[in-house]
Each structure stands twice: as structure tokens, then as C-alpha cells.
Image (cartoon, helix red, strand yellow):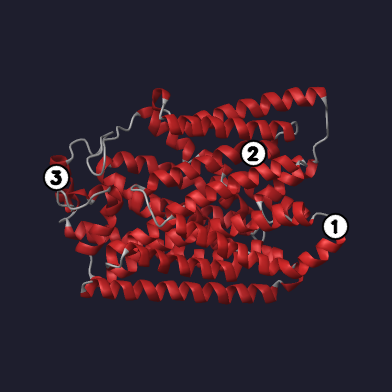
Amino acid sequence: MTGKQTVILGILAVYMVFTMVIGIWQSRVSARQHSSQGFLDNYFAGGRGMGGFILAMTLVATYTSASSFLGGPGLAASFGLTQSWEAGIQIATTFLTLGVLGKKFALISRRIDAVTVTDYLRARYKSAPVVIISGIALIVFFTTQMVAQFIGGATLMQTVTGLPYMWSLLLFAAVVIIYTSVGGFRAVVVTDMIQGIIMTCGTFLLLFFILKTGGGMHHLTTQLNQINPGWNLMGKGHYGKGILALQPGYLISFWVLVGIATLGLPQTAVRCMGFKDTRSMHRAMVYGTVVVGILMIGMHFAGTIAAPLIPKGAIKTTDSVIPYVVLHYMPTWAAGLFLAAPLAAVMSTVDSLLILASATIIKDLYLHYIVGNNPEREEKAESRVQKYSFGITLLLGIITCIIAMNPPDIIVWINLFAFGGLEAAFFWPMIGGLYWKKGNATACIASMIASLSVFIFFNRVKIAPFHIHEIVLGLLAGGIVYFLVGRYSYAKHPFEADSELL
């Protein structure tokens, strides 16, 4: 380990410990301020007191991940501006999520005391199979996505500090698991706010030093024209294993995958249950849009113009592009500060997924289907639920860490598979449930099965008609099934959906 790597490791260690301490401390403050709301509401919903800035930052931090700071910008070094254009659709995600889901989810969650998306699905569809299927899908895809984030965090630390992968993984995992397990939702949103600020500052730092090292924009574009002709058009990758042509159908599909379909992501939808008031939501829509724009366009553009700074054969996969640039071309202090940004992105995604997966097991499955309405079991559960919540969150983190010990190569594809799986499972049950009164349990179950089956089938067989991503095919199948089954079953057995859940 070089002297520079030692200093960077020290900066990252201080940042991680600071994040952990702040998260746990804020959780304790929230528990005292909202003690009348009970443990579950505080641990899994943070007392529903988020202001506009915190709401914006926790949404941004939850949405951004290792793909945003490592995988995506790394691919941009290969594909050129194609990847930046593709990332542009993500700018509207915070605005879209709060605009479509925000107010309705906030009002409904307060009325039915919901702290998870599955709570809403239970109240809307009144079906145990809906809850169980959605709970299983959530845990499976959350675990997959957390594995990608654990790999990203450990790979980052290994690359820039020289620590072995295993030690990097264990250090990263220990910090995130401890403050999430002990602090709960409030620790997650407060640390997300800090991490959102760090990510924004880190993006500007990276752009500044790439332009400085490369001799300015004119010199960099001249080199790009030589080493990667067509970098400003649809191009082909030249780093990593294999060559991937980005076709129009595939690019358009990303407007679904990382755009409108993000309405089906439970980890961002659940944020709509925790803000303080409508004014906070409106402010968050503006703040979040600006910050996501800076992060997505800034980081992917940085990856694009960083290509001339990478010597031929210096890296094995695109995931190493940004760490290489940081380690070789940024001064030690700036490298340490910047590297806190992708680490923050990874940590903020993991803690959000971890707390929601824990909530699904404890509240959606254990309390409703194991404890049920049995008075004797309820009395015992009240005294144990806090311990169980801590334990389940800790156990999920450890399991994910163990899976991540033998990592595959490219993080972005693992992340996008989990991303798409969650959207396929939850998009129509949530959107249809909120805005279509004929949606019922039969339609919901049929839609989830159809959407997931089509998505997984095309993902595994690697067939992409017209280069269309499997998420588009999965959502198309799920939507057709949801509305056809809903209309047919409603015609045979009309029912009145709860107007307050629509």
C-alpha cells in the first residue's frame, strides 16, 4: 500500500465512522421526538417527519448507486456520449416519483398506518397471496441489488486503498450493517442527506481534475476523436469483455427502465410515506431534480471525457475507469474526498434496501401471518419485535455480504437486473391499484406472475426483439394481463374498491 493509498484509506475510514455515528445519534433523537408513534413507525418510517431537503436527498441517494458512480461512467468511457444521453432520462425520476405517488401514498400510509409498500398492497387488494408474492419478490431482488452494491463498495476500496477485496468487503459491510440495524429508517435518511451532499461535491471535483489533467475540453475531444471515433454518436465499447452495440431500441428501452418504470421501485416509493407535509414534497421535487441532473449527467460526462486518460491495457473492466482516474490524476486530499462520493452512493442504496427488506419480513410477514390476530402471540410479539427487527436487519446484511464474497465482473448489469425485477413485480400493482378502481387481487397476482416471467425469460435466453430490453416486454405483458383480468373479473364479480386507496 502506497503513502497516497494509506491517506485515502484514512479519509474513507473517518467518513464511514462519522456516517455511522451520525446515523445512530439521529435515530435516538427521532425516537425521543416521536416516542408516541411506537417502535415500528419510528424504526421503519422515521416518524414521518422528513422536510423537503432531506426527502430530496434520501430519494436521490437511494436511487443512485455503484452503477451511477462506477458502472455507468465506466461504460461511458467506452460508449461515449451515448451513455450520457441514456443517463439523462434519470433526471426526472424524483419529480416523477413524488408527482405520481407522493401525495396519495402519504395520505394512505397515515390512514392505514403503513410503513412499507406491501402494507399498501395488503390494504388495497386484501389478499394474503398478493402480500406473500410481493414480499418474496422484494426480498429476492433487494438481495440481488444489495450484492451488487456490496461488490461495488468493496471493489472501490480495494482499487484505491490496496486492501484485499475480502477485507474491503468486510469493512464496508460492517459499517453499513451496524448503523442500519441499530438506527433504522431515521439513520438511513439522515445519512442519505449527508451522502447526497458528498456525491454532489464529488462530481464537481472529478470533472475539474479530468479537465485540468486532460488539458481542457478542446484537447480531450481531439484525443477522443482519435482513440474512439464516433464517441459523440451511438458507438461500440472497447473496454472490458466483449463488444456491445447500443441500438435505438435498446436505448429507448432505458427510458422505461431508468425512467417511467422507476415508479415501481419500492425503495423510492416508500419515501413517499415519510415526508412531513405537501410543502416539503413540492420542495423535494425541485431539489431532487436539480441534484439528480448534476449527478447523472456530470458523472457520465466525466466518464466519457476520461477515456483519453486511460492507457491501453491499464484496466480490465469498465468498473475500474473512475477509480483509475481518481487514483492516478487527483491529489490525495481530492481523491479521498471524491471517493467518499461513490462510497456514499453505495452505502445509501444498501441501507435503504436493507431497512425495507427487514420491514417486509417483520411487519408484512411475521406480524401479519405468524402472529396474526392471536392475542397471546401479539402480547409476546410486542416485547420481541424490536429485538427481531435489529436481528433480521443484521442477518440480511450478513447473508448479502457472504454472497458478495465471490463477485462477477460488471456491477451495472447485476444492478439493472435487480432494478428491472422490482419494476416488473411492483409497477402495475402500485400504479393500477392507485388509479384504477377495477384492479383486484386476481389481476394483481396474474400481472406480477406474467410480468416477472416474461422479464426473467428474455433476460436469461438473451433474446431482444428489435434490441428492446426485457423490462419493456415484461411491463407490456404485465399491463395487458392486469387490465384484461381486472376487467373480466370485475364484470363477473363487481366490487367497490376503497375510495380512499384510489
Residue bearing the label numbered 3: 222
Residue that carries the numbered disc 2 in the rendered image: 431
Image quadrant where one finds the N terminus: bottom left
- Tell me the number on the disc at residue 320: none
Compared across the picture, whether 285 is left or right of 402 comes to: right
Q: Residue placed at 85% from the left, 63% from the top?
A: 376
Name which residue type carries label 2.
Answer: Ile
What's under tag 3, amino acid-wise?
Answer: Thr
Q: Are marks 1 and 3 in contact (CB under 8 Å)?
A: no
Judging from the image, what secondary structure is the residue with disc 2 in? helix
Q: Name which of mark 2 and mark 1 comes first in the sequence.
A: 1
Say which of marks 1 and 3 sits in front: 1
Gap between marks 2 and 1 measured at Cα: 33 Å
**Quick one: SS at disc 1?**
loop
Residue drawn at 55 percent across, 43 percent down: 422
Q: Residue drawn at (28%, 64%), measured in percent from left and top?
A: 160
Q: Looking at the image, is 401 positioned above or below residue 7?
A: above
Label 1, on which residue? 374
x 67%, y 65%: residue: 388
Vertical comparison of 232 with 379: above or below? above
Residue sitting farthest toward the right? 375
Give how far across and how far down residue 406 sits, in percent: 38, 54
